Image: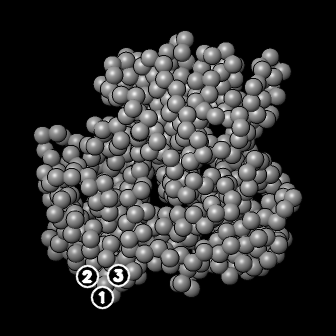
Amino acid sequence: MCGFLVLIQPFEMVSAAAAWRAADSLVHRGPDAAGYWQEGDVFLGHRRLSIIDLAGGAQPMASGDGRYRVVFNGEIYNYRELRAELERAGAAFRTRSDTEVLLEGYRQWGEGLVDRLNGMFAFVLWDLRERTAFAARDRLGIKPLCWAVRRGSLVAASTLEPFGRLGGFDTLDLRAVRDLMAFDYIPSPRTIFEGVHKLEPGCRFSWKPGMREPAIDRYWSPPAAPNAAEPPDELEVEALLEKAVARQMVSDVPIGVFLSGGIDSSLLVAFMARHSAHRVRTFSVAFADAAADESAIAARVAQEFGTEHTELRAESVGHEELLDLIGRLDEPFCDAAFVPTVTLSQQTRKHVKVALSGDGGDEVFGGYTKYLAARAAAAPVPLAALIRRSLAATAWRPRGGGRLYARTLGPRERLRFAWACYGDFPVFRKDMRQLLAKQLHERAEVEGFFSAWERRAERYGGSTEPDALMRTDLETYLSENCLVKTDRASMLASLEVRVPYLDEAVLERILPLPASNKLAGGQLKALLLPIARRLLPREVWDRPKHGFNVPIDERLAGAWRPAVEAALDWGEANLEVFNYPYLRRLAAINRAERGIAGELWNPFVFLAWSMARRQTWRAAEPSREIHTAAS
């Protein structure tokens, strides 16, 4: 993995020294080497985590004819096949790297290059002759890419850290705060900074000096609707996954695997064992909470396949370390599983430089009970509309009202209520208007809290049927939450993580299938279960599904309580974004009774992240500052 920064500034906005410093803010993404190239008004900076062609893969890299320069983050798993094809067309290569394949592939195929790539990638390529920047991001957004156009200049980077170093990108997008409170993450193309954008997954762009913004187009989307293709049999699914695992094991450095004890990661171990000349290295995390802990099952899988197994206890993260971890994020992110994923990555990085992960298995193969629950939802209670109007009309928010309110909703509204932590709901704990400072309600556009999800859902008909939900999840929960969590957590430890369940060959065969093939007879992961029964210990597949969960309410009331109090104290003095009496009430209830998780955790994460930067936020409207406290 790597990190990069691109600056194309016809009128100098940033000095060369400032650009170098900004690029070096990505050192955790690439601690092995730094590279810089500058010519006139173009600067390319790169930090490298060396995985393939350790000696010859340095970046920024020039094409053989000198016309192109590229900075690249990721891995191209079919680069050897593409290289052979390019050599047959006359290309000559100087290195063994996949980066050079990108350069020569673009020279041969232009923007069509991205359609041929099997991998995880984000890159920016500069054409010196045409003075054009071309950028692309992989199909499901495994690797990140952010951009902004300011004062006629293009800034593009792997993540947001360089923007903070460059200055001038410190305007808070209140709608991003709203989205963070609702979803736990900030959906693309929005970022926490007004005017800075994420390139959406499956998209590419081109830009020339003089353009107000890049020309963006989508080169790939999940299938809009299921087709009637014959579903694969057990052996075909096994062959697909085994080939994907073998392809993603290619590395010039040691490689391991995250082992949770679930079906997805355990199958990875089984396939890796077939293709490894040495004992597979497996890594897992143990929780004190028995309901969340799967370490014993992970150890059983490790024993079954003779792996070299390392187990880490999650309780090692104290309140000071928690604040440090949150403060190191490029933007606030509220999936609490980020915390044990960081510690797991740190432990793993002591032994290997690359790890495989089971991310994507649930979304591609149908592993969530919510896909079944969508059809099984009960009908609204009698007088539902009257009850909703009554709850909306009262200023008093009774505790426990959410259970009654949920029963008054139809399928689409019930999905909103169940899937959003905060929203436009007239009930205690989920009412975003109670959370936000009153003067910000209109500017945060509270009523649009679910618009980012619905924009994606409309591509698949906007229904609450499993087919539509599974496809929408690929672009939302998977791309914006799960993959962001894994990328940011692993990169803080300078560990590359690969995701075989999102291999292009797997996606092309499995995604077009209807949900009925993946949830046959109400069975989650119906396509994987026969393989799991044949290859894995019974303890793995004959039990309820577990997630990689953190008992947030217990931690916020216990070990992490000092961090919560510090963040609330700082926010109340410096950041007029939240209704602090409301948050303190939530904290008090949780200390006394537990049971309050995301409603307290999400605001805490935003405050802790801001506190770490001692950030004096400016609102999106420059004349109306959120607060005036000094940094």
> Residue under circle 2?
588
> Residue under circle 1?
592
**Residue type indicated by callout 1:** Ala
Answer whether residue 44 is visible to the viewer in this image: yes
| Left or right side of 347 for 542 | right
Picture coordinates of residue 253, whole percent (x, y): 73, 51
Compute the Cα span from label 2 to label 3: 9 Å
- Tell me the SS state at disc 2: helix
- Tell me the SS state at disc 1: helix
Q: Quadrant of residue 572?
A: bottom left
| Mark closer to the chain start, 1 or 3 | 3
| Left or right side of 584 for 2 | right
Picture coordinates of residue 343, whole percent (x, y): 54, 67
- Residue depicted at x 20% and y 58%: 575
- Residue depicted at x 54% and y 22%: 126
In the depicted structure, whether residue 241 falls above or below residue 110: below
| Mark closer to the chain start, 2 or 3 | 3
**Residue type indicated by callout 3:** Ala
Count of marks overlaid on the render: 3
Compute the Cα span from label 2 to label 1: 6 Å
In the depicted structure, whether residue 302 falls above or below residue 96: below
| Left or right side of 606 for 131 | right
In the depicted structure, whether residue 461 falls above or below residue 425: above
Mark 2 vs 1: CB contact within 8 A:
yes
At label 2, counting other C-alpha atoms closer than 10 Å, the crowd grade (few under 14, some 14-19, many 20 or more) is some
**Residue type indicated by callout 2:** Ala
At label 1, counting other C-alpha atoms closer than 10 Å, the crowd grade (few under 14, some 14-19, many 20 or more) is few
The mark closer to the camera, 2 or 3, is: 3
Picture coordinates of residue 386, whole percent (x, y): 24, 70
Q: Quadrant of residue 278?
A: bottom right
- Residue depicted at x 84% and y 21%: 88
The disc at residue 557 is: 3
